[in-house]
């Protein structure tokens, strides 16, 4: 009986002790405090309730983010807070570990608490937008300047020379982000209390971190090398026409169009468009009054002379072997070029276009100097190849006569009001030579310059003979009386200008 009682007592004690131990373990696992001896960013947080510990960490983080660091940009020191640099700190790993204290089974929670790390640091994170607002593109331009493109110069002797461009420094933002984040993490680890914990650096918080901002060199978009790759090696042709008989308005228009094509660079296969040039000239320089061609006559208008530029450029282009895409001759021969070698322009109706088929970039230079319009083309082509141009008149078109009546004229008389001009049909050939020997001849164009009629006034026809009976249209002449001249339909466009006629 005694043994049985002893056994019962022993079992009861074991159960009691077990319950006590189990209860103690339960209380230990669920105490809701930070494990003893825990240090976070130099803060002793062991024994604190979780919310209190988090609050203390947040206060410490706010304090640390207001600490200064020094960024050195090309020798210039910029002092700012970590927060202003876009750096924020957090104890994310610690917070996650604290969450694990209340997760899992009792034994898992006990194991987590027993194995809880005693020393925790902060982790740094970077906000690129905040950092970007600190070093804006405008700030970089003010600090370092802007790249300067290389320039191709054409010397007075037509030799090509180059002025090198200038590179500038810019902040290497990707590298700066990495180095700034790394420096912030190193600095945060130094905040650990004591400085003798494994894997942590000694505390040194009295001096701010100094960080040399990494820079990179930015080359200009246009460099000497990129210009040379265009293949513009030498002057390949030059053509000029005279301006000695041009008035002030016409000279201005020619100069405006010349300045508008000067410096144009065409890539291989690119098409030159004269309509765009004239549009630019109108907007940039303005066009003045000068004679334009309208209904086969020279009349006052705006822009007279612009076709001298297209015609001069046309001659340079065909002497370089380039492909002509669109070109038409004037309705009247021009004084500054042989027939068949001109290129007219009529806004919205007739354009002049050619294609750069040289295989290299093509530079157009144009200027007016000493009563000469000079167009030069720079590029590259075999030096043993040359082109000449020949124009041949294949047919002459006689001037027709148009009659009008004038009652004041005596019978048998006539009066030439407007003298007509002969028309022409002209064929133009481009002759290719290699090493001075003709290898090819190509018909470039077959142009027609319409004849312009003579306008003749005659008396009003009367019935009966007498004086003037032999005049054209008299009853005895065998001819019918000329009908009054029909109104000529107005031409739909103005040549060699942009508008007209301007009669005052």
Image (cartoon, rainbow, N blue to C red):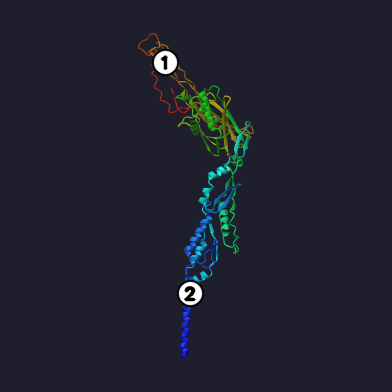
x and y percent of residue 176 in the render? 57, 51
Mark 2 falls on what kind of element?
A: helix
Total count of labels: 2
Which residue shows up at 41% across the image and 25% down it? 490
How far apart are labels 1 and 2 at the CA level? 135 Å
The answer to whether residue 310 of the structure is visible from this angle is no
Q: Which of marks 1 and 2 is nearer the N terminus?
A: 2
Find disc 2 in the rendering and name its residue: 24
Q: In which quarter of the image is the C terminus?
A: top left
Numbered tag placed on residue 285 in the rendering? none
**Number of other residues with Cα within 10 Å of mark 1, as a class: few under 14, some 14 to 19, many 20 or more:** many
Q: Which of 181 and 361 is in front in this view?
A: 181
**Which of 281 and 239 lies nearest the eye of the viewer?**
281
Determine whether 284 is above or below 335 in the image.
below
Quarter of the image for residue 364 reads top right
The N terminus lies in which quarter of the figure?
bottom left
User: Circle 1 — which element?
Assistant: strand
Closer to the eye: label 1 or 2: 2
**Is 86 drawn above or below residue 351 in the view shown?**
below
Image quarter for residue 178?
bottom right
Is residue 62 visible to us here? yes
Q: Determine the residue located farthest toward the bottom in the rendered image.
A: 1
| Image x and y of residue 464, in percent | 35, 10
Left or right of residue 318: residue 452: left
- Badge 2 crowding class, 10 Å Cα cut-off, few under 14, some 14 to 19, many 20 or more, is few
* Residue linked to disc 1: 457
Judging depth in this view, the residue of 156 and 35 nearest the camera is 35
Percent x, y of residue 465: 37, 10
Does 207 sit above or below residue 239? below
């Amino acid at each position: 009986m005694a043994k049985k009682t002893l056994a019962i007592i022993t079992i009861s004690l074991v159960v009691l002790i077990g319950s006590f131990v189990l209860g103690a373990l339960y209380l230990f696992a669920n105490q809701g405090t930070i494990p003893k001896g825990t240090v976070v960013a130099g803060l002793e947080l062991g024994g604190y309730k979780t919310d209190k510990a988090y609050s203390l960490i947040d206060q410490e983080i706010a304090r640390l983010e207001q600490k200064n660091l020094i960024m050195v940009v090309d020798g210039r020191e910029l002092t700012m807070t970590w927060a202003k640099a876009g750096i924020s700190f957090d104890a994310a790993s610690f917070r996650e570990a604290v969450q694990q204290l209340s997760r899992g089974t009792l034994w898992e929670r006990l194991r987590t608490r027993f194995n809880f790390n005693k020393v925790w640091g902060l982790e740094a994170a970077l906000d690129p937008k905040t950092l970007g607002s600190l070093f804006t593109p405008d700030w970089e331009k003010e600090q370092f300047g802007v790249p300067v493109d290389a320039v191709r110069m054409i010397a007075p002797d037509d030799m090509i020379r180059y002025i090198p461009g200038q590179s500038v420094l810019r902040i290497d933002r990707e590298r700066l982000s990495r180095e700034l984040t790394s420096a912030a993490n190193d600095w945060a680890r130094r905040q650990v209390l004591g400085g003798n914990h494994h894997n942590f650096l000694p505390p040194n918080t009295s001096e701010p971190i100094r960080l040399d901002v990494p820079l990179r060199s930015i080359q200009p978009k246009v460099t000497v090398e990129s210009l040379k790759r265009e293949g513009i090696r030498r002057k390949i042709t030059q053509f000029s026409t005279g301006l000695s008989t041009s008035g002030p308005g016409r000279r201005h228009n020619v100069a405006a169009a010349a300045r508008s094509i000067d410096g144009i660079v065409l890539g291989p296969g690119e098409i030159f468009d004269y309509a765009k040039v004239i549009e630019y000239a109108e907007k940039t320089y303005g066009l003045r009054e000068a004679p334009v061609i309208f209904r086969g006559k020279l009349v006052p208008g705006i822009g007279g002379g612009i076709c001298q530029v297209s015609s001069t450029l046309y001659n340079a282009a065909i002497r370089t072997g380039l492909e002509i895409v669109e070109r038409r001759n004037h309705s009247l021969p021009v004084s500054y070029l042989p027939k068949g070698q001109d290129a007219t322009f009529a806004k919205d109706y007739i354009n002049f276009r050619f294609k750069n088929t040289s295989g290299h970039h093509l530079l157009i230079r144009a200027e007016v100097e000493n009563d000469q319009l000079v167009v030069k083309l720079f590029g590259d082509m075999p030096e043993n190849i040359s082109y000449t141009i020949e124009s041949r008149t294949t047919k002459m078109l006689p001037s027709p006569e148009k009659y009008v009546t004038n009652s004041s004229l005596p019978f048998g008389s006539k009066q030439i009001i407007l003298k007509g001009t002969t028309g022409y049909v002209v064929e133009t050939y481009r002759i290719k030579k290699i090493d001075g020997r003709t290898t090819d001849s190509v018909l470039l164009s077959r142009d027609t310059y319409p004849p312009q009629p003579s306008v003749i006034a005659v008396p009003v026809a009367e019935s009966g003979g007498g004086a003037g009976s032999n005049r054209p249209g008299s009853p005895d002449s065998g001819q019918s009386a000329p009908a009054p001249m029909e109104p000529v339909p107005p031409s739909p466009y103005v040549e060699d200008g942009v508008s007209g006629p301007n009669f005052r």
